Structures are given as structure tokens and as C-alpha cells.
Image (cartoon, grey):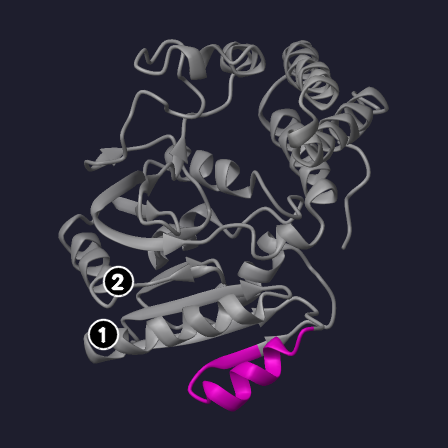
Amino acid sequence: MTELSIVIVSWNAKKYLGECLASLRSVSRNLSIETIVIDNGSTDGSPQLVRDQFPEVKVIENGCNLGFARGNNIGIKLATGKHICLINSDVNVPADCLPKMYQFMEQNPDIGLLGPQMLASDRHVARSGMRFPTVWNAFVRAFAVDSMLKPYGVFGNLLMTDFGFDKNKDMDVLNGWFWMVRREAVDEVGLLDERFFMYCEDIDWCKRFHLAGWRVVFYSEAAAVHYGGASSSNHPIRFSVEMQRASVTYWTKYHGRVSLVFYLVAIGLNHAIRVIVWGLMYLIKPGARSEALFALKRSAACLHYLMTLAVFDKAGPEVTV
């Protein structure tokens, strides 16, 4: 059996994809690996890049954007490795990252899902996990209490502002930029939920790993660089709305109607407050108008989506790209 299968879903991220695949070449000296690229209908020449410069990589062309969850599921079904890595196309993987993670998985058979430390492009440690969403931490986030009182976990719940991501820790959620999963755990837990086009599939999958009794662990001793937004930057406002749709889908899956109403009020307040703040910023700070206008449009689009939502019937129209 191949020791490690690497699955990369890509959509119009040619520059980042090339760097990601180049960084993975050094891994084969330490592990037996296979790499599978699932291309979601890119128009920037990404599949041809893979064929020309990385002939050892298997590339699957979907012809259209099937979304993050469905794209990864295609790769998982093709994978033959003992463990499977799902890595975003905008990640640069140092040579020692995957061997360290693989060894840690081998030493800890109760871990179903493992994630490394995330380094931003300037190499500072970035947040790569979160706690499960609740009505409480949604209201805390809406009023930015977690940002004002970062050291206190009771206020910093959702985005874990009280944790430095500098030590190993069992987590509620590992965000889906880079995962190593145990094949037998996937066989038990199941594939990613394809109702999530993009976003919140990570929260859902981690929830299901926990429910099945598998540990979800942040591993600080291995790190990789995540540039962020390689695909979503192509249509940032539309992807922001998709994030809201996904969050409602997740909440509907695991919570009742009353809880859903309170959750919608919380995230609606979040965007309403930001519309007001960014609107004022646009008026009083001419030098920041470009940034303020974009942020204003993004929050307004999300707020409009939430206000027109058929709350008890569906999670709203899927955002397609």
C-alpha cells in the first residue's frame, strides 16, 4: 500500500498550484506517495501545467466547478494510501512536514484527523482551527468581544483568540486548508458532505470524527505556508455569501429551528454592525475608501442573503462559480 496519498483540489490557481506541487517533490524521498490533482474547471491552464511539469501527478479534470467537498471526495475515492492528505492548492509544504505528520499518526492510532501549524506568507503563525459554533460565540463574534478580550477563552470561543497555536492540542475543528486523515477513520466517518459547496465542510467533518470517537489534533511540530484565497479571491463577495449559506446548512443539520433563529439573528447582527462601521469609515476616512467600500459591499451582500432566506425550508440558493 502507498504510505501517503495527497489530494489537491484546484480552481484557477495555476501559480500557487505549481509552487505547491514543486514543494511536494521532496517528500517522495522520505515516503512512498501519490499525488492527485482534482481540477474544478480551471480556465487558466492549470491542468496543462500539471501534465507538462509534473508528469508523476495524476490530474482529473471535472470540466466545471464541483466545489471543495465534492472535488476532494473524487480524490479520496481514487487514493490508495494508508493515510490521505487533503491540501489546498495555495500551500507550500516544507520537506519535513509530511514525514513528521505521518510519523505522529503512526505513533497515535487514535488520531483520525491531524493538522499542522499554519504559517502565513510572512511566516508568522496563523490561526488554523476553531471551536464548534454556538449561539453564544456567534453573538460574541457579532459584537467583536472576542477581539477586545483575546486572552479570555469565555469571550474568545469561536476563533480561539486565547490559543497561540504553538503547542499540540486536541481541537474541536481543524480548518480545511491542510488535513492528514487515517483511511480507516474515513471508512468509518464517511466522505465530506457534498451539500457544502465550499466552507463549513471542515466543521461538519470534524464534528463527525468526534461523534465517531476519533481524535482531531493540531500538531505544532510540523508547519506549512498557506497563502490563502487562491480560489476565493477570484470572486470574493460571492464566496463570502457562500460562507453564510454553508454556515446555515451546518446549523440546520445539527440544531433545531429555535436555535437556528437565534443563530441567524446573531450572524445578521454581525453583518449589520459591520455595514454601519464600514459605512462610517467610508465617509470619514477618504484614504481608506477602497477597502471600506469592498468590506461594506461584502457585509451588505451577506446581510441581504440572510434577510431573504427561507429559514425553515432550505439554506438558500447555492452559490455557483
Between 314 and 48, the one nearer to me in the picture: 48
Name the spot of residue 282 as percent of width and height, x first. 72, 23
Q: In this view, does 98 lie to the left or right of 212?
A: left
Q: In this view, does 296 lie to the left or right of 118?
A: right
The part of the image, by quadrant, that contains residue 241 is top right
52 falls in the magenta region: yes
* Residue at image point 55% right, 42% down: 201
Where is the N terminus found, in terms of image quarters?
Answer: bottom left
Give the SS element for disc 2: helix
Distance from disc 2 to disc 1, alpha carbons, whole Å, reads: 9 Å
Tag 1: amino acid: Leu
Q: Can residue 77 be seen in this view?
A: no
Q: Mark 1 points at which residue?
A: 31
Can the viewer see residue 194 in this picture?
Answer: yes
Element type at mark 1 = loop
Q: What stretch is highlighted in magenta?
A: 44-59
Disc marking residue 98: 2
Is 5 drawn above or below residue 148 in the view shown?
Answer: below
Sequence-wise, the earlier of marks 2 and 1 is: 1
Tell me if residue 79 comes above or below residue 152 in the rendering. Answer: below
- The image shows residue 86 at horizontal and vertical percentages of 43, 58
For residue 172, which quarter of the picture? Answer: top left
Q: Do the residues labelled 2 and 1 touch (CB within 8 Å)?
A: yes
Q: In which quarter of the image is residue 45?
A: bottom right
Query: In the image, is 162 to the left or to the right of 309?
Result: left
Query: Tag 2: Cα neighbours inside 10 Å, few (<14), some, or many (≥20)?
Result: many
Picture layout, residue 161 above or below residue 203: above
Image location of residue 204, percent across then percent down: 52, 37
Residue at the spot 58% in from the left edge and 14% down from the top edge: 142
Residue found at the far left of this picture: 107
Q: Viewer-proximal residue, 65 or 234?
A: 234
User: Residue type at mark 2?
Assistant: Leu
